[in-house]
Amino acid sequence: MLDVKAGDEQSFTLLLHRYRSPLVNFLYRMVRNREQAEDLAQEVFLRVYRAREDYVPSAKFTTWLFRIATNLALNSVRDTRYQRMEISLDAPVTVDAEEGEEKTLDIAEKHPNIEQHLVEETRKKMIRHAIEKLPEKQRAAVLLHKYQELDYGEIAKILQCSESALKSLLFRAYETLRVELAPLVAQHGKS
Amino acid sequence: MSCSRMEKKILGYLDRRLKESERLEVEKHLAGCAACRLRVNGFRAVNGLLDELPTIEPSPAFDLRVHARVAAEPMKHSWRAWFPSPRVAIVAAALVVATVWVSTRPTNTQPQIAQDDIPVLENMDVLSNFDVLTELPPPAQVDDGGQQQN
């Protein structure tokens, strides 16, 4: 990032290549819409570029990057929630009408073992919905903890809370997931 | 260790981020507490279930879009842009100091008198009162008749 600050355009391209996939995946899991996730990820990179001259390496670059991404995602989730509430008054959104996801049946038709495939898809859908049902901040904490493998201190900085508050947040999130996914947890325990 | 204290240690235990003494304390508690053991196993299972979610790849046009948005950004004119680089600033400052020093240093006000000028200066009174002779006096009449007779 210091090279980007010095005006090295190549370093910005390197940053883009290194972080685009983790960012898009994090944002996708936050907002549950691929197109929106990519738009937000682009916005993150744009903000990084705009802030390059003022960048001070006081924290790890990933902490700074995911702090921007998390703030954008939380704002987007809140905005979308209000939009959905308005839409639901006229036309309720069905569970299967998730944007950005491939239709299960289209793939299932091509799959040799449709039954097995449907079971797997149902499992994934349950897991996705359990994550989606978490309060936004808990969801962000779990995603940063599980998929970005950031340490507690970094995640606390990203979410702008104390480390002990973060541990409490994570505990509540994993406890909710354990309860929500109880049937799968039981299966997992047996296997 | 109590179950409520265990709640604060459970993630650190699963993430292997506890000190050795803390880890032993947690394991001692788990050996005697079925509820906490169930919770730890449940958390471990949730962790495994989260691994099942597939990752997505950014679309092929993602980089192009980012670069296009960056290229569309207006040039930033920060106050720093008005300042030259440190090297140029040092050279410019040195030039200013040198100019000021040259223009303000005391100069020798005594005029240099060349050796050839000394006779002129000695006759300065004569030269300054010198009037240009516009009319020459008539030439003196010389009686040279006798001389011719001789």
Image: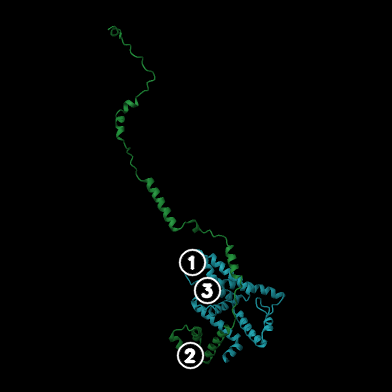
Chain colours: A cyan, B green
Query: Residue B28 at what x, y percent from top left?
Result: 46, 91
Chain under label 2?
B
Looking at the rendered image, the disc whose residue lies closer to the viewer, 2 or 1, is 1
Q: Are marks 2 and 1 in contact (CB under 8 Å)?
A: no
Q: Residue furthest left?
A: B150
Residue drawn at the location 49% of the way across and 56% of the way down:
B82
How far apart are labels 1 and 3 at the CA level?
A: 23 Å
Q: Secondary structure at mark 1?
A: helix
Pick the front one: A115 or A132? A115
Q: Secondary structure at mark 2?
A: helix
Q: In this orientation, does residue B45 appear?
A: yes
Q: Which quadrant holds residue B124?
A: top left
Which label is found at residue A158? 3
Query: Residue B14 at what x, y percent from top left?
Result: 50, 85
Q: Secondary structure at mark 3?
A: helix
Q: Residue furthest right?
A: A90
